[in-house]
Structures are given as structure tokens and as C-alpha cells.
Amino acid sequence: MATFEYILVESKGAVGIVTLNRPKMLNALSFGVFKEIAAAIDDLEADDKIGCILITGSEKAFAAGADIKEMQPKTFIDMFSSDFTAVGGDTLIMFVTWDANGKLSSRSIHQFGSATLDKLSPHYADQTPLFVAMKTKPVLFTKKELEGHIEADYAPGERERAEQR
């Protein structure tokens, strides 16, 4: 496995662990950090023994956010044509937290939508506006949370079978 400047990489059993390691910058996310995370994930995905990849920070801070000093001289166009956006790939960003009582909450974003292969799906590009605005959406876990958001009830493949008739 490669050696990195801004992250630490290890494995514990089937879990690959990527730890942000810029303590003086509170793990601020720079272009270098993103490139190293991508390289580490590529390495871990190539290892058949790894079944899960965990990205973590320090006790003081997961990540302070974007490295503003690095971004400051850049224009909007520079940022959105740079390494801060997904190019020719796929990404899912998910933030998961547990409160002191153990209650789970999560927010996520995907640069396209949850149905990236089905152009007929209402979810084909439903998250793109959120991704561009750099916003997240809640992840719903329980039946009660989901019920208020159900627009249609269907079985996987149902649309395709109907089209074939």
C-alpha cells in the first residue's frame, strides 16, 4: 500500500480504515487530501480481503471542512472544474452520527440520483440540484420515517415488465 502525506491507511480484518491526518489544520479537506483518499480507496477496493472502508478523523475533529486558504484564490469556475467535483465517476457522501443516547441520524448526497441507470426513473437525477448547491438530504431508516415520503408503491422490474406486455 502507498505512503501518504495527509492520511493514514490501515486494515483491521475486513475493514480498511482511512484516517485524515492534518492535525494542525483540523483535517481541513484540501485537493491533496481528496487525491490521497481516492488513491487509498482504489488500493483498498483492489484488496479482496477488504469488505468495508471507513473514513475517520481525529478525536478533536473529523474534518474542519474545506481548506479555505487553498480555495481562496480560486474562482467559482476553477472550483467546479477542479478535483473538488466528481469527474467521470460516481460518489456517495454520507454523514452518520449517534447522539449520547445512541439515536442514529444520517444525511447523504449523491451527485446524480438514486437511480443512475434508469433514465425513466423520477430519481434519475433527483439529487443533482442538491449536489451542485453542496447540500445534503436526510437518510430515512424506519418505516415511520419512510411512510411520509412514499410517492408510489412498485416492485423492482415492474415498469420493465409492463413495457414488455
Image (tube, helix red, strand yellow):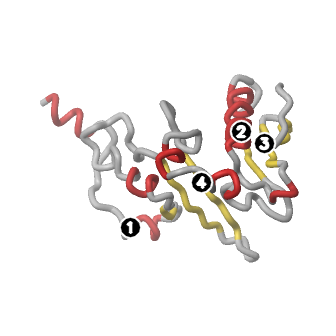
**First in sequence: mark 1 or mark 2?**
2
The image shows residue 85, relative to residue 60, as above or below, that is above
Mark 1: which secondary structure? helix
**First in sequence: mark 4 or mark 3?**
3
Q: Residue at x 28, y 38 (%)?
A: 119
The CA span between labels 1 and 2 is 36 Å
**First in sequence: mark 1 or mark 3?**
3
The residue that mark 1 highlights is 147
Percent of width and height locating residue 64 = 73, 62
Quadrant in the picture for residue 40: top right
Mark 2 burial class by Cα count in 10 Å: few <14, some 14-19, many 20+: many
- The residue most toward the bottom is 101
Mark 2: which secondary structure? helix
> In front here: 96 or 73?
73
- Mark drawn on residue 33: none
Q: Residue at x 68, y 59 (%)?
A: 65
The residue that mark 4 highlights is 94
Q: Residue at x 31, y 36 (%)?
A: 118
The CA span between labels 4 and 2 is 15 Å
Amino acid found under the numbered disc labelled 2: Ile
Numbered-mark total: 4
- Badges 3 and 2: C-beta atoms under 8 Å apart? yes
Judged left or right of residue 74, residue 88 is: left
The residue that mark 2 highlights is 37
**First in sequence: mark 4 or mark 2?**
2
